[in-house]
């Protein structure tokens, strides 16, 4: 289940007033009341649950934007690789028979 914005804001407000001493792991979060009062030796490790709550809480609209961005990234990556393939094939054609025989065994002359 995806948390709603109200649930995320309520959790953020509850976390804002906390101290690292109140957490079981002793992990430090930015904005803690005692954030600047500790030394690096006192800081505990964050759990994966804390990392997921901090990084992966998005609204459905934000998830849609992320998905569209990944689709666009794959689209351009595909055409970049297609362009490299065409560049290699055209180098074989322009070079003639001699270059074709030299590069014939290579599937990707760029690599």
Image (cartoon, rainbow, N blue to C red):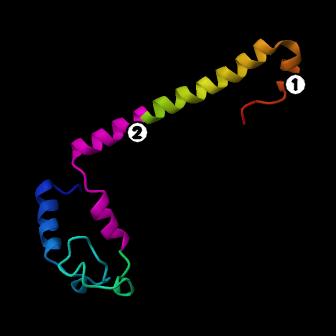
85 relative to 68, above or below: above
Magenta span of residues: 47-72
Res. 87 image quadrant: top right
Residue 69 counted in the magenta span:
yes
The residue singled out by tag 2 in the image is: 70
Q: Position of residue 51 (x, y in %)?
A: 33, 66
Pick the front one: 73 or 61? 73
The quadrant in which residue 73 appears is top left
Front residue (pair 67, 86): 86
Measure how far apart labels 2 and 1 are at the Cα level: 38 Å
Q: Is residue 103 above or below residue 37?
A: above
Q: Between residue 102 and residue 60, name the one nearer to us.
A: 102
Callouts 2 and 1 close, C-beta under 8 Å = no
Q: Earlier in the sequence, mark 2 or mark 1?
A: 2
Task: State the residue at coordinates (63%, 27%).
Answer: 84
Location of mark 1 (residue): 102
Which quadrant of the rendered structure holds the C terminus?
Answer: top right
Residue 64 highlighted magenta (yes or no):
yes
């Amino acid at each position: 289940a995806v948390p709603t914005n109200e649930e995320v804001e309520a959790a953020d407000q509850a976390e804002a007033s906390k101290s690292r001493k109140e957490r079981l792991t002793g992990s430090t979060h930015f904005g803690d009341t005692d954030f600047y009062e500790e030394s690096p030796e006192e800081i505990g490790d964050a759990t994966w649950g804390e990392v997921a709550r901090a990084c992966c809480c998005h609204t459905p609209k934000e998830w849609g934007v992320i998905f569209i961005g990944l689709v666009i990234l794959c689209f351009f990556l595909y055409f970049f690789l297609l362009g490299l393939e065409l560049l290699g094939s055209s180098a074989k054609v322009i070079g003639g028979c001699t270059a074709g025989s030299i590069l014939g065994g290579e599937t990707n002359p760029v690599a």
